[in-house]
């Protein structure tokens, strides 16, 4: 299992890969690789899914340098690259401070 420190390092250094779904969503939602790297400096785990369908995962909240909030669901299994399962900008009407579901 990855620690938050490992997750941050992998995000900042660009050691991540997209699931097909996440790649498609990043394009649809205009989320750049640079923004993903930026959130590595300001990211925290807000939900954990130890029994997720394919592998244990968690939901991250991070902020870009322009203060854009992003959620990334990632696999927390140890691997050379961080696997991004999905990515989106959270809807303020569904989240309290982007980190707790309403």
Image: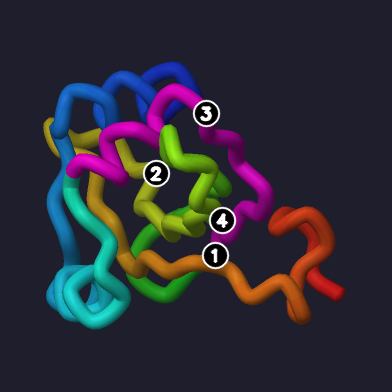
Please give the label number shown on residue 76: 2
Which tag is nearer the camera, tag 2 or tag 3?
A: 3
Q: Secondary structure at mark 1?
A: loop
Q: Is residue 48 magenta?
A: yes
Q: Which residue is mark 3?
A: 42
Identify the mark nearer the N-term, 2 or 3: 3
Mark 4 lies on a secondary structure that is: loop
Q: Secondary structure at mark 3?
A: loop
Q: Between marks 3 and 1, how big is the CA–CA gap?
A: 26 Å
Please state which of residues 97 and 80 is positioned toward the viewer in this rendering.
Answer: 97
**3D distance between C-alphas at marks 1 and 2:** 11 Å
Residue 51 versus residue 72 in the image, above or below: below
Neighbours of disc 1 within 10 Å: few (<14), some (14-19), many (20+): few
Q: Residues within 10 Å of mark 2 (few under 14, many from 20)?
A: many
Magenta segment: 34-51
Residue wearing tag 4: 50
Q: Which label lies toward us, 3 or 1?
A: 3
């Amino acid at each position: 299992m990855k620690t938050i420190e490992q997750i941050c390092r992998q995000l900042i250094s660009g050691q991540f890969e997209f699931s097909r779904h996440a790649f498609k969503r990043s394009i649809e939602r205009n989320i750049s690789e640079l923004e993903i790297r930026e959130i590595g400096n300001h990211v925290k785990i807000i939900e954990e899914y130890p029994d997720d369908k394919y592998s244990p995962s968690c939901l991250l909240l991070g902020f870009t340098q322009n203060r854009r909030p992003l959620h990334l669901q990632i696999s927390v299994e140890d691997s050379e690259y961080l696997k991004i399962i999905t990515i989106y900008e959270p809807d303020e009407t569904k989240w309290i401070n982007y980190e707790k579901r309403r």
